[in-house]
Image (spheres, rainbow, N blue to C red):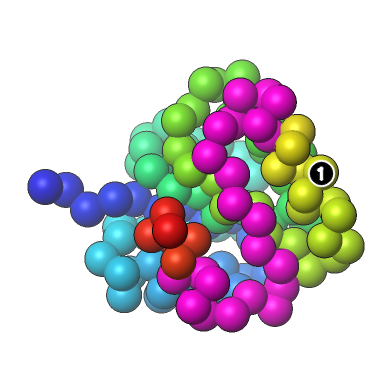
Amino acid sequence: MTPQRLLVIDDEVEFGKLVGRVGRDLGLEVEVTADPDRFKALLLSFKPDVIVMDMVMPNTEGIELIRWLSHERYPARVIVVTGYNPDYAKMAALMARAEGVVQVTTLFKPVRLAELRSALLGQ
């Protein structure tokens, strides 16, 4: 059985690395990026089962990427993360579901490791 794959996009490099380490510790194959174009390329080539996505980034908004995922009809579980107003993440999750991205979890920075592990495992 091949391990599940995790793709992380976050402009906070250290947070992205942390999520990547936690994912690897859980046995996931991991790719981390801060670049939206690289994210899209990795999505198509790496084919992740789980995506951790920051909502507020300088070069793109998580909302734009959710719309793109929906357009691509990509079936990964999506974990929406934000350090901003929690209502923004909740709104993004509602929009994602409305756009057809069915499996959406929201986490708020600072994220507790137990919460992150649980979300990555789909629990």
Badge 1 element: helix
- Residue 99 within the segment the image draws in magenta: yes
User: Residue 11: image x %, image y %?
Assistant: 69, 63
The span picked out in magenta is 96-117
Viewed as shown, does residue 82 lie left or right of 112? right
Question: Where is residue 52 shown, x and y percent of the image?
Answer: 55, 55
Q: Position of residue 42 (x, y in %)?
A: 45, 41
Q: Residue at x 49, y 61 (%)?
A: 119
Please indicate whether residue 44 sits to the left or right of residue 96 in the image: left
The answer to if 119 sits in the magenta stretch is no
Q: Residue at x 11, y 47 (%)?
A: 1
Give the camera-side residue of 56 and 44: 56
Reading the image, the residue beneath label 1 is 91
Q: Is residue 60 visible?
A: no
Kind of residue at badge 1: Met
Q: Is residue 79 above or below residue 14?
A: above
Q: Callout 1: 10 Å neighbours few (<14), some, many (20+)?
A: few
Q: Is residue 28 above or below residue 67?
A: below
Q: Quadrant of the C terminus?
A: bottom left
Residue at the outermost front position: 123
Give the total of numbered labels.
1
Position above or below: 123 against 69: below
Residue at 71% in and 73% down: 109
Whether residue 74 is visible to the viewer of this picture, yes or no, is yes
